[in-house]
Image: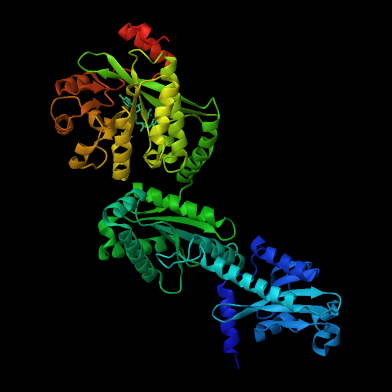
């Protein structure tokens, strides 16, 4: 007859996925303590498998398991009680056990019991001499066994199940992939990542509808996905809005992908998910045991990114897009170093022109990075990456400092041009941001109106309250503010009206095709300028590349402009020369 109790116990043990995992310090620490407290050479966390005692942690023994038959730990498991054998040789049953025959004389083991009451094994200490155990030693052993259990349950719960979807996490995916690779090495599989929405969509939904709506969306997607996958196969929650699963073995890839696509079409058509997000699916073929779980997921996730760009919302992994992602990881990693070196980062300066007088009234400081291996990397590439990390704050600090140094260098007290610097949304969260700028100006004898801060419309709208507070503070300090890339974000008029910013920079996307005083872009730009003027803003047009655009904008009473038509961004020295030539006022630039 099958022992159902034992089957349930083994199930509980297997569920924890502890067997055959590598040693970990969190358990070894406890085992060492047990050995020290008893002053004995051997201690182990010994788990009772169906036929063996397997050691999750051990000191003083080389082998990783012994047969279950006649193992004292198996008795501890079965009885869920503390067991002390003062002399194995004096015990007719254990004298003949593997341990007894190998010279073990003393044994003490405390049971490892789950919160559901299942005995998993024992925390045991072994000695080669017969001895007794003091009540203090035994109490310590029981405490340490409880610590082992706490560690086991904590490890199992923590990071293995996502609280929102209830699905196993990326950590579990890793563990399961290792198990699978052990059981079926060399088997072809597909990893599929379902990306429920772009990050910016998630943050917008969170902002507009609240985090609960995102959770709900994820739960709904989870339910749909599990229906598609049928109950036997697991899905995982591998990123904030990313679910993943593995294809079954031995499928025909193309047919499988077609079937998947159909299923997802059906989900999309029937669920409310489609109203707020667009799902993208990435697929990564791989061979079990030949690739770490993280690479498998990264490949599938990178394919999902491609799916967003492609038309069909499903994309197969391609190594070229992975190369792009590798580059991004590399850039992020190397930028930290660049900030600390003196020869990789520098500022260039693009003049800002008064459209009525043609005079240069300022310059925008733009960051440049010469990577030691990759050469020049555009800020359009690295800034968006950096802005997703904590490096954003340091970067702004570097830029602001360098710009102020340059101002001071150019002899800041006279009527020299003002410099504009770009800051990131992350700076809005810095309590002392404005003070630090003020201090920097003061230290160098610069006036606050020599510096202008540019913040993009979308950064402002990401955290409107914080933005308002910081912008007010900057304004109060006499530092000028410009809303950058205007027209690309989604600010409301009511909000714009309250902002203490005085300058509005129209994004170059609107200016680029401005060749004649008609057409949709013309109407848009005309409206934007009119609106900005009514709200009291001074308007700067960005990205003027042609005489036509310059003329149209002058006509529309746009006050100032930047663009290749006037000048490209220049090195500091070159800019100073350019300015001298154009304005003929060298004295302004010489200290
Ligand atoms: P932005 O702040 O809107 O800067 C204007 C960008 O437009 C600059 O690109 C400039 O070189 C380019 N530009 C100016 N005139 C023309 C034109 O006539 N035609 C065209 N096609 N482009 C023109 P750049 O230097 O590559 O910078 C790109 C973006 O990177 C900047 O856009 C800004 O958002 C960001 N960035 C640059 N430096 C910094 C920085 O120091 N800090 C932060 N947070 N962001 C920066
Ligand atoms: Mg800018
Ligand atoms: Mg801009």
Percent coordinates x, y for residue 309 in the rendering = 35, 46
| Image quarter of residue 57 | bottom right
At 83% from the left edge and 85% from the top edge, which residue is drawn?
95
Residue toward you, 73 or 227: 73
Could you tell me which quadrant the N terminus lies in?
A: bottom right
Percent coordinates x, y for residue 3 in the rendering = 60, 89
- Residue 412's place in the image compared with 295, above or below, is above
Task: Determine the quadrant in which ligand 1 lies.
Answer: top left
Residue 54: tell me if it is visible. no
At 43% from the left edge and 10% from the top edge, which residue is drawn?
591
Residue toward you, 228 or 470: 470
Percent coordinates x, y for residue 469 in the rendering = 31, 40
- Residue 243's place in the image compared with 426, above or below, is below
| Image quarter of residue 496 | top left
Residue toward you, 476 or 336: 476
The residue furthest bottom is 1
At 33% from the left edge and 56% from the top edge, which residue is drawn?
279
| Image quarter of residue 97 | bottom right
Residue toward you, 237 or 398: 398
Residue 302: tell me if it is visible. yes
């Amino acid at each position: 007859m099958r022992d159902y109790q034992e089957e349930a116990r083994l199930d509980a043990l297997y569920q924890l996925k502890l067997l055959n995992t590598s040693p970990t310090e969190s358990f070894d620490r406890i085992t060492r303590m047990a050995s020290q407290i008893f002053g004995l050479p051997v201690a182990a966390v010994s788990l009772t498998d169906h036929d063996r005692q397997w050691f999750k942690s051990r000191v003083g023994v080389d082998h990783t398991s012994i047969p279950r038959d006649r193992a004292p730990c198996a008795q501890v498991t079965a009885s869920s009680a503390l067991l002390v054998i003062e002399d194995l040789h004096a015990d007719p049953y254990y004298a003949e056990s593997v341990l007894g025959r190998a010279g073990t004389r003393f044994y003490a083991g405390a049971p490892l019991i789950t919160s559901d009451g299942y005995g998993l094994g024992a925390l045991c200490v072994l000695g080669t001499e017969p001895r007794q155990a003091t009540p203090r030693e035994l109490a310590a052993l029981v405490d340490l066994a409880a610590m082992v259990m706490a560690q086991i349950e904590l490890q199992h719960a923590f990071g293995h199940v996502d609280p929102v979807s209830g699905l196993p996490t990326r950590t579990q995916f890793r563990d399961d992939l290792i198990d699978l690779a052990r059981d079926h090495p060399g088997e072809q599989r597909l990893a599929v990542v379902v990306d429920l929405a772009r990050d910016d969509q998630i943050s917008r939904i969170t902002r507009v509808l609240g985090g609960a709506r995102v959770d709900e969306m994820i739960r709904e997607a989870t339910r749909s996905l599990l229906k598609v996958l049928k109950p036997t196969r697991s899905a995982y929650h591998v990123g904030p809005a990313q679910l993943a699963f593995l294809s079954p073995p031995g499928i025909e890839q193309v047919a499988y992908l077609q079937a998947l696509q159909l299923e997802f079409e059906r989900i999309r058509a029937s669920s409310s998910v489609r109203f707020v997000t667009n799902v993208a699916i990435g697929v990564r073929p791989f061979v079990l045991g030949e690739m770490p779980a993280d690479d498998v997921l990264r490949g599938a996730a990178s394919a999902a990114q491609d799916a967003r760009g492609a038309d069909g919302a499903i994309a197969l992994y391609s190594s070229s897009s992975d190369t792009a992602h590798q580059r991004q990881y590399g850039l992020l990693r190397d930028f930290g170093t660049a900030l600390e070196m003196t020869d990789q980062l520098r500022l260039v300066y693009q003049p800002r022109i008064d459209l009525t007088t043609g005079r240069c009234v300022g310059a925008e400081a733009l960051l440049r990075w010469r990577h030691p291996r990759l050469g020049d990397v555009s800020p359009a590439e690295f800034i968006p990456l950096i802005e997703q990390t904590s490096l954003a704050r340091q970067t702004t600090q570097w830029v602001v400092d360098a710009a102020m140094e340059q101002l001071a260098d150019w002899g800041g007290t006279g009527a020299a041009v003002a410099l504009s610097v770009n800051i990131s949304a992350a700076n809005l969260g810095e309590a002392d941001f404005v003070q630090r700028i003020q201090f920097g100006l003061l230290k160098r004898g610069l006036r606050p109106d020599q510096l202008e801060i540019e913040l993009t419309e979308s950064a402002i709208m990401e955290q409107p309250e914080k933005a308002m507070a910081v912008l007010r503070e900057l304004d109060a300090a006499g530092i000028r503010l410009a809303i950058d890339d205007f027209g690309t974000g989604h600010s409301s008029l009511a909000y714009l009206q309250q902002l203490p910013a005085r300058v509005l920079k129209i994004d170059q996307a609107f200016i680029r095709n401005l060749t004649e005083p008609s057409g949709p872009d013309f109407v848009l730009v005309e409206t934007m300028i009119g609106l900005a003027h009514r709200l009291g803003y001074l308007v700067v047009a960005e990205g003027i590349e042609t005489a036509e655009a310059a003329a149209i904008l002058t006509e529309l009473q746009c006050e100032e402009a930047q663009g290749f038509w006037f000048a490209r961004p220049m090195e500091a020295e070159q800019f100073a020369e350019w300015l001298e030539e154009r304005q003929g006022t060298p004295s302004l630039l010489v200290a």
